[in-house]
Amino acid sequence: MDTVELIIGLLVVIALAGVGAVVGLVRPRRRRGSLPPRPGARAATGPGEDPLPGVGDDAEVPRDSPSRAVDVLDLPEGPLVERPAPALGRLVRLRERLSRSNSALGQGLLALLSRDTLDEATWEEVEETLLLADVGFGPTTEIVDALRERVKVLGTREPALLREMLREELLRAVGTDVDRTLRTTRHADRPAVIMVVGVNGTGKTTTVGKLARVLVAEDKDVVLGAADTFRAAAAEQLATWGDRVGVPTVRSDKDGADPASVAFDAVKQGIDDEVDVVIVDTAGRLQNKVGLMDELGKVKRVVERHGPVDEVLLVLDATTGQNGLRQAAVFSEVVDVTGIVLTKLDGTAKGGIVVAVQRSLDVPVKLIGLGEGPDDLAPFDPEAFVDALLS
């Protein structure tokens, strides 16, 4: 038994020696912060700080040092407010678009007048071209008679001279001595008030929104009144236009609310906020003329408790031609229209509607719409318009 115990004891000793050797070969891993400093490196100045690598004062910040936080910018709450393009020069910018859509009028007339022989048949074609462009019978007769007389007296076929004569006659028909100024100047104690009327579908509410952009571009403070309470989407649409340029919209919480009450509240807010202009959008239903008269007449009377309405703008769709003239006649009986807004003028070859509507209502065209863009509403410039027709 002694021999067996001795052998077992020797095996235990050998085993323990082997374990110790293995343990001696395996060293514990050091933490990054416990590495010994490199020669010439600065020592850590406080507990938990790592020494900077490098030499002396030229040492660089290690890559694993805490990163600098990104600065957080304070963004404005709510939707971003746009800055509309200046209204000045818009018609010049859009002249090419206008000339493309109305080439049938200007270029057609120039082609007829440039023929070698201006016989009776040619003059009838000139007359027909003007009538098809919705110039109207009266103005057409005046233009043709004047051109015939001038061509007869001068006896010329020179294209440049014929073009100048046509330009002068068209300008005379359109009118260059008419006051087309929008009355948007604030009064001493209240804002200027603009009522916008017209049949639904002509772009009336959109025109109100675009007009607000024109005025904001002129640094005017504006309030919108959503008095078209019978069309559910009208107030929402108008508010969206206003929000884009930072203009408040007065509206009713209930569909079918009294339009006159909404218009009154809009002007009152304009007075309280001391704004420059209040624009009131009105309903454009034409089921019967009596109902329209009653509604618009009431809106105008209620608004005028604050003071006279400065502008009543009638919005007409230029593509409707003579039908638009009939609509204009109805509205002119209801309210005292002071200016015309012709929309969709770029989508028709009937630019002569400018002449016809002015002649029938004895009211000037003050604004024209030349596209779907938010800044495609421009002050009407007779010379730029006629030049676009003849370009």
Image (tube, grey):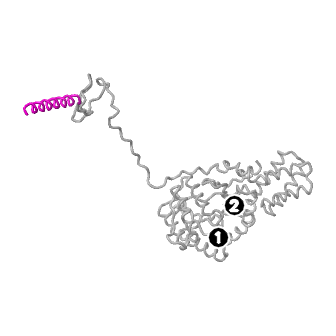
Residue 308: tell me if it is visible: yes
Residue 276: tell me if it is visible: no
Quarter in which the N terminus is drawn: top left
Relative height, residue 134 to residue 24 (above, below): below
Position of residue 312 in the picture relative to residue 119 (left or right)? left
Residue 22 is covered by the magenta coloring = yes
* Residue type of the residue flagged with mark 1: Val
Dot 2 or dot 1, earlier in sequence: 1
In percent of width and height, residue 231 lies at 58, 69
Span colored in magenta? 1-26
* Residue type of the residue flagged with mark 2: Pro
Position of residue 129 in the picture relative to residue 9 (left or right)? right
In percent of width and height, residue 123 lies at 88, 56
Number of numbered tags placed on the structure image:
2
Q: Nearer the viewer, residue 246 or 201?
A: 201
Position of residue 126 in the picture relative to residue 207 (left or right)? right
Which residue is found at the position 87% from the left and 57% from the top? 125
Question: Outermost residue toward the bottom?
Answer: 290
- Assess disc 2: are there few (<14), some (14-19) or many (≥20) residues with their C-alpha within 10 Å of its C-alpha: many
Q: CA distance from mark 2 to mark 1?
A: 15 Å
Q: Which residue is mark 2?
A: 364
Q: Nearer the viewer, residue 154 or 174?
A: 174
Q: Which residue is mark 1?
A: 335
Q: Secondary structure at mark 2?
A: loop
Residue 188 is covered by the magenta coloring = no
State the image quarter where residue 102 is shown.
Answer: bottom right
**Dominant secondary-structure state across the stretch colored magenta:** helix
In percent of width and height, residue 233 lies at 56, 66
- Assess disc 1: are there few (<14), some (14-19) or many (≥20) residues with their C-alpha within 10 Å of its C-alpha: some
Which residue is found at the position 88% from the left and 47% from the top? 157
